Amino acid sequence: MEKFPLTAEGYARLEAELKQRKSIDRPAIIEAISEARAHGDLSENAEYHAAKEKQSFNEGRVKELEAVISRANVIDVKALSGDTIKFGATVTLLDEDSEEKTAYQIVGEYEADMANKKISMTAPLAKALIGKQKGDAVEVRTPGGTRSYEILDVKFK
């Protein structure tokens, strides 16, 4: 099986979700199924079917999380350093068109979260940034057209 990188923070978040799904969500769903069964005829019991569907989703996510966690190569970003952008780097960019500054952290695909400015290392922007340094200019092809950025800072935190 192929290993893939995860930050220590991302790994901890996935482990916490797995624990939640196994120790809290799973018993609650089992209880809901038992309650719905007590209502009688299962063929017309919407509560029963909804609980079974929720159980199916939860068990699928548990299997996915277990697979991800077992193949993770956990990297402590705080132990990394240097001027070159690589996995785990937090990069501050200046959009050369809008003059807007934005910082992104390059993370593994299972922990990417645009709302928290964490981009997957497989994303077009991350691919364009990897290997570059502070002061470099980068052009990125996006579905909305080509964007130009200047790299203002590279940190590992």
Image (spheres, helix red, strand yellow):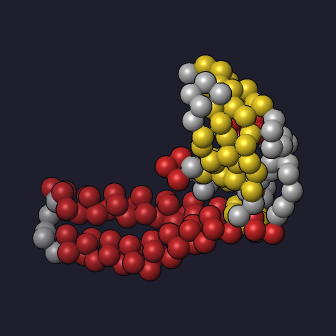
Drawn side of residue 38 relative to residue 69, left or right: left
Q: How many marks?
A: 0
In the picture, the quarter occupied by the C terminus is: bottom right
Compare residues 20 and 12 and report the one nearer the observer.
12
Q: Is residue 128 above or below residue 36?
A: above
Q: Position of residue 100 (x, y in %)?
A: 57, 35
Residue at position x 83%, y 43% in the image = 133
Q: Is residue 118 above or below residue 6?
A: above
Q: Is residue 54 above or below residue 27?
A: above
Q: Quadrant of residue 76?
A: bottom right
Res 60 seen here: yes
Residue at position x 73%, y 43% in the image = 152
Res 109 seen here: no
Residue at position x 65%, y 21% in the image = 146
Q: Position of residue 67 (x, y in %)?
A: 64, 63
Q: Kindly give the residue lying farthest to the top in the view shown.
A: 145
Q: Position of residue 81 (x, y in %)?
A: 84, 61
Q: Position of residue 38 (x, y in %)?
A: 16, 75
Q: Is residue 37 above or below residue 90?
A: below
In the picture, the quarter occupied by the N terminus is: bottom right
Drawn side of residue 154 relative to residue 111, left or right: right
Drawn side of residue 78 relative to residue 131, left or right: left
